[in-house]
Amino acid sequence: MKKVLVLGGGFAGVDAATHLRKRGYDVTLVSDRDYFYIYPTSIWVPTGEASFDDVKVSLEELRDAHGFTLLVDGVGTIEAKANRVTLASGKVIDDYDYLVVALGAHKMKHPGIEHTLSICGDPRESLRIKERIDALVAKGSGKVAFGFGGNPKDTSAVRGGPGFELFFNLHELLKKKGVRDRFELTFFAPMPKPGARMGDQALSMMDTMFARADLNKHFGKKIKRFEEDGVVFEDESKLESDFTMFIPAGDGHGVIKASDLPTSEAGFVTVNDYSEVVIDGEVSNVYAAGDVAALEGPEWRAKQGHVAEVMAKNIAFNIAARDAGKAERKGYQEHLNILCVMDTGSGAGFVFRDDKKAFMMPMPILGHWMKKGWGWYCRNSKLGKVPRLPGL
């Protein structure tokens, strides 16, 4: 039985391990956390609508459900040409036949970033955001600034959706507490039209939603630095804030940048359509999926969980086809689209975009519960308790 080493316990890593096991491979999964974190539903942890345990799944449970070997450890170095991975503990793994890299991304570093918290960062930051929100609610008033940044070297590495979702959920929470009129809520971003990748209709709907909820916008100015009491922009203007939530754009993972893997200008692993890594002109035994990979495609492309899942499933198929001597391969390009249910706390908007169309459909009330249902589905389908949706 051939051995596959999977690095990373997120959407790409867990799905790669799961699908490879279904195809009979001996799989070892390495993760620096002992749980799989459901980032899309973590937006409810800061508002108290979900607990931290609600949005994580034990990797031991996933191991028991699917039969892979689990190592809870960090990754120290990757030497692809030498077929060797050294873990943070010092353990060396060099007996694998295939390597699947799914480590995710690191974040862009902004001066003063320590004065912010991110809903897309370390999972436990969601609990710290909750503490800050609870403190402001107890105080009864305040100025709050939420935002996200960009990576000029890779437009696919921007992740603003969760910021918008948490922003609207905070608005709803303050309404329920009866203190919304005592808070100044501002959303900021360096680009003139944040969310433009969703399409013109979505942008128009977002403008309407901001106006109806009396939410402020501060767009089109580059961020110079963060301070304890606000955000300073390139023209030295300042957005005052008692609490700043900021999602930096993704950047190449430090371990990847230090490895001998081929990378894009932004430090992401370069792959072909089949998620194969080409080294020295030859298709290697290394594959990459999810945020760690450099996605090719249209300007609006985005690194999302469902794309990571497709890449992971394709990798399992492609490895099996390769071992069987078959020429057929499956690629991720045909599956590139933006697909999400953007929760607002009182409803949601269904967002879809591909090369042919782009739209956002409002789903009052029902949309919120649809996303709740998706969270249940995500947890239980990963554990094999309910069937996966077709294509996944």
Image: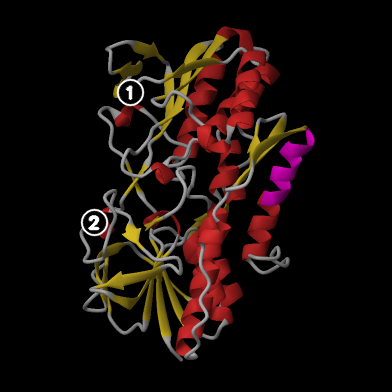
Residue under label 2, please give it. Answer: 257
The residue sitting at 52% across, 80% down in the picture is: 328
Q: Position of residue 148 (x, y in %)?
A: 43, 31
Q: Name the residue nearer the viewer: 205 or 306.
A: 205
Majority secondary structure of magenta residues: helix
Quadrant the C terminus occupies: bottom right
In the picture, measured across the screen, residue 62 lies left or right of residue 245, that is: right
In the picture, measured across the screen, residue 135 lies left or right of residue 108, that is: right
Residue under label 1, please give it. Answer: 222
Say which amino acid is labelled 1: Lys
Residues drawn in magenta = 365-374
Q: Is residue 205 magenta?
A: no
Q: Name the residue nearer the viewer: 279 or 287.
A: 279
Q: Is residue 173 visible?
A: no
Q: Is residue 44 visible?
A: yes
Q: Position of residue 167 (x, y in %)?
A: 56, 26
